[in-house]
Image (cartoon, helix red, strand yellow):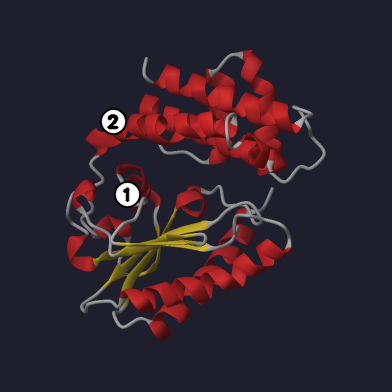
């Protein structure tokens, strides 16, 4: 387990490097930069976590080509070493969604992002993290690296939409993920079975908790929530997921790759079923 001070230093160092690159290359100023996600919630883990952030652009019409260059330049720093180690994801990378300063006071579902990048993917005019969950974290626990504190931004996370948004995400992403990793995607999923187990067994219960309580929690907290909420038959895969997330290579609560993936997928399906009954 990483100390909060160590995690904070690692996040701030990476973010400062990202901003130096953005300031040098972009033709529209970054007037605000806010860390959200696991780093804001206290669940950031080196080697396991990305850094999720919202960048606010001031006056000017940003060049999409320049935004792509910032993405390429910053992702390469973490992505190439990760690929060299055999990773298909880039832990430690800044995943950033860009929005205009003038849009911040709009209801979150009405904001059209300028662009976003996650890992190796870049999207123009779109960004998954402009949603009620991320905006809830931004408003309540976002870390201001540059710009006013989040409470002064006039954000509207649309809390009345949290339940519906999370149910839709369970149906459209998580149910399909479970079908994919036990269907056509099974061979690839088993090659990274501990990562897949952690992704599914901790990811879907996070949404279940938000639907049930209105709170947005970390992946580790989602594991504790799953242990307290779901039947004992799901506990081995949750313990396996927590061990991976916390960097414990010795614990193998579910000993085979196939069982890990299949049990994580089965738990996700149970989470989806249960969430619709809340």
Q: In the picture provided, is 23 more to the left or to the right than 50?
A: left
Nearest the viewer among 5 and 205 is 205
Which circle's residue, 1 or 2, is located before the other in the chain?
1
Q: What element carries label 1?
A: helix
Tag on residue 164?
A: 2
Q: In the picture provided, is 127 more to the left or to the right than 82?
A: left
Q: In the picture provided, is 164 more to the left or to the right than 189?
A: left
Quadrant of the image occupied by residue 146: bottom left
Q: Position of residue 233 (x, y in %)?
A: 65, 15
Tell me the residue that label 1 is attached to. Answer: 135
In this picture, is 41 found above or below 7? above
Q: Which residue is drawn at 65% across and 35% down?
A: 241
Question: Which quadrant would the C terminus be assigned to in this image?
Answer: top left
Tag on residue 173?
A: none
Q: Which residue is drawn at 17% across and 66% down?
A: 102
CA separation, marks 1 and 2? 15 Å
Q: Is residue 210 visible?
A: no
Q: Can residue 110 be seen in this view?
A: yes
Q: Position of residue 42 (x, y in %)?
A: 53, 49
Q: Residue at x 17, y 54 (%)?
A: 106
Marks 1/2 in contact by CB < 8 Å: the verdict is no
Q: Position of residue 61 (x, y in %)?
A: 22, 77
């Amino acid at each position: 387990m990483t100390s909060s001070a160590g995690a904070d230093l690692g996040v701030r160092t990476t973010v400062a490097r990202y901003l130096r690159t953005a300031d040098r290359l972009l033709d529209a100023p970054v007037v605000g930069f806010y860390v959200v996600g696991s780093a804001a919630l206290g669940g950031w883990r080196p080697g396991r976590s990305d850094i999720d952030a919202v960048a606010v652009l001031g006056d000017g019409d940003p060049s999409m080509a320049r935004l792509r260059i910032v993405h390429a330049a910053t992702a390469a720093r973490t992505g190439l070493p990760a690929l060299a180690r055999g990773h298909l994801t880039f832990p430690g990378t800044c995943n950033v969604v860009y929005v205009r300063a003038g849009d911040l006071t709009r209801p979150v579902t009405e904001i059209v992002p300028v662009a976003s990048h996650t890992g190796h993917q870049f999207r123009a005019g779109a960004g998954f993290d402009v949603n009620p969950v991320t905006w809830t974290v931004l408003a309540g626990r976002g870390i201001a690296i540059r710009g006013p504190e989040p409470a002064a931004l006039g954000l509207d996370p649309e809390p009345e939409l949290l339940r519906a948004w999370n149910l839709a995400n369970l149906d459209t992403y998580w149910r399909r993920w479970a079908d994919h990793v036990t269907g056509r995607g099974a061979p690839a999923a088993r090659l990274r079975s501990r990562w897949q187990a952690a992704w599914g067994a901790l990811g879907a219960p996070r949404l279940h908790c938000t639907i049930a309580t209105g709170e947005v929690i970390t992946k580790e907290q989602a594991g504790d929530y799953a242990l307290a909420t779901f039947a004992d038959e799901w506990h081995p895969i949750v313990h396996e997921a927590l061990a991976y997330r916390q960097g414990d290579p010795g614990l193998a609560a579910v000993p085979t790759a196939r069982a890990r993936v299949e049990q994580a997928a089965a738990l996700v399906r149970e989470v989806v079923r249960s969430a619709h009954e809340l």
